[in-house]
């Protein structure tokens, strides 16, 4: 016996439209959760990189400080070495100038150089030659010059020339 | 009957929409927005630090290259200040300037800033003052930092000029470098 001309439709609790809507809702929620996870992960990554960078900055600052200290130390050594090298060069030039001062007619037998004084022992044909050719240039260098003469048997003179610079001042 | 079913579906849909709306609002305000703020804050801080790191790195590299350049230009001085004065080596290196040369052992006499100062006395025989000038010039190339010092005496003797002189040898004090620099 048949009561209807159509077949009965299968009844469903959730309609197709509702299921489709739930699917899109699910997609929306998943996207929101993924966006949240992305933000949390990236935020953590930035924070971690930030801490690493801070640590690196601190280490680099420390190393820079050490290098600055090394630079200062090498600079100090260079300045001191330059002073010493200049002193050596000046000493050499002073000695060279001193020996250049001595004329051929005068023979210097002995020289004693101190920081502020010079003592010369030598032989000169006579007093005038000594005074004109050696004492005059010595007086232009030193503040005080004293000379003692001894006459030798052959008529030449033996001289001891003592020359001083004032303690406070350098050469004239 | 169909109308009833349809209205039930509408209730489901409305309920689901309300739940979604509630979820979106709660999720956004409680989690997503604070996470976004944290992300933004951390990103800005990282970028700032990154810029600072670049500057510090560049400065470090500049200082390092300055140091290396300075070190390579002054390698002789640095080594010479580190070397201990060896009288035998000094004699061997300087004997060409003298007919004879003898030097005493280095005796520590003073401290000059970051340096220990040693004194060395020397007696020599030279054939001409020129040899002595050359010797003094060679001191600036010696293995140690050596300074010619007073008193210097020269006397004509048989066979040449007897020269007595004093030298100061400088050596870096055995101290912590940073302490030396701060001094």
Image (spheres, rainbow, N blue to C red):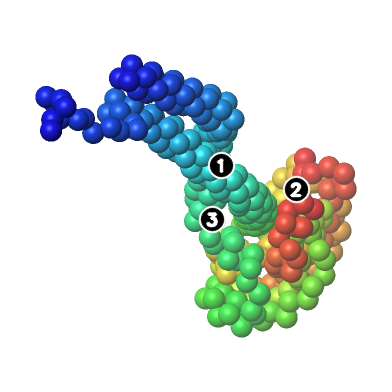
How far, Cα to Cα, is label 3 from label 1? 39 Å
How many other residues sit within 10 Å of disc 2, few (<14), some (14-19) or many (≥20)? Answer: many
Q: Does the image show residue A108?
A: no
Q: Position of residue B82 (x, y in %)?
A: 63, 68
- Give the labeled residue for mark 3: B71
The image shows residue A95, relative to residue B41, as above or below, that is below
- Give the labeled residue for mark 2: A138
- Picture quarter containing residue A16? top left
Q: Position of residue A41 (x, y in %)?
A: 48, 42
**Residue found 56% across the figure and 27% down from its top:** B26
Q: Are marks 3 and 1 on the same chain?
A: no
Secondary element at tag 3? helix
Secondary element at tag 2? helix
In the depicted view, which residue is nearer to us: B142 or B166? B142
Q: Does the image show residue B141?
A: yes
**Residue found 69% across the figure and 48% down from its top:** A133
**Residue found 33% across the figure and 27% down from its top:** A18
Tell me which chain the residue with mark 1 is part of. Answer: A
How many other residues sit within 10 Å of disc 1, few (<14), some (14-19) or many (≥20)? Answer: some
In the depicted view, which residue is nearer to us: A48 or B177? A48
Q: Which mark is residue B86?
A: none
- Give the labeled residue for mark 1: A47
**Residue found 40% across the figure and 23% down from its top:** B8
How many other residues sit within 10 Å of disc 3, few (<14), some (14-19) or many (≥20)? Answer: some
């Amino acid at each position: 016996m048949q009561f209807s001309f159509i077949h009965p439709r299968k009844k469903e609790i959730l309609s197709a439209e509702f299921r489709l809507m739930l699917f899109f809702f699910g997609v929306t929620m998943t996207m929101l959760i993924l966006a949240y996870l992305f933000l949390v992960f990236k935020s953590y990554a930035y924070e971690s990189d930030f801490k690493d960078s801070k640590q690196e900055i601190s280490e680099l600052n420390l190393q820079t400080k050490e290098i600055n200290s090394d630079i200062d130390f090498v600079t100090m050594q260079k300045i001191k070495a330059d002073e010493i090298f200049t002193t050596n060069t000046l000493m050499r030039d002073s000695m060279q100038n001193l020996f250049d001062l001595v004329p051929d007619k005068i023979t210097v037998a002995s020289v004693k150089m101190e920081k502020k004084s010079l003592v010369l022992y030598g032989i000169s044909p006579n007093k005038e030659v000594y005074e004109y050719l050696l004492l005059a240039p010595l007086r232009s260098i030193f503040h005080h010059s004293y000379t003692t003469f001894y006459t030798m048997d052959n008529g030449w003179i033996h001289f001891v020339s003592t020359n001083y610079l004032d303690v406070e001042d350098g050469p004239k | 009957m169909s109308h009833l079913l349809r209205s039930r579906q509408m209730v489901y849909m409305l309920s689901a929409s309300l739940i979604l709306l509630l979820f979106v609002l709660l999720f956004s305000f409680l989690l997503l927005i604070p996470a976004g703020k944290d992300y933004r804050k951390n990103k800005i801080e990282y970028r700032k630090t990154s810029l600072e790191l670049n500057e510090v790195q560049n400065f470090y590299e500049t200082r390092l290259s300055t140091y290396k350049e300075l070190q390579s230009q002054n390698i002789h001085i640095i080594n010479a200040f580190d070397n201990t004065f060896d009288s035998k080596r000094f004699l061997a290196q300087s004997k060409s300037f003298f007919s004879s040369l003898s030097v005493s052992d280095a005796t520590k006499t003073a401290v000059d800033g970051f340096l220990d100062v040693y004194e060395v006395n020397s007696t020599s025989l030279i054939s001409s003052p020129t040899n002595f000038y050359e010797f003094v010039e060679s001191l600036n190339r010696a293995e140690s930092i050596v300074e010619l010092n007073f008193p210097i005496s020269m006397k004509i003797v048989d066979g040449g000029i007897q020269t007595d002189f004093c030298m100061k040898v400088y050596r870096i004090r055995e101290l912590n470098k940073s302490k030396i620099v701060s001094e």
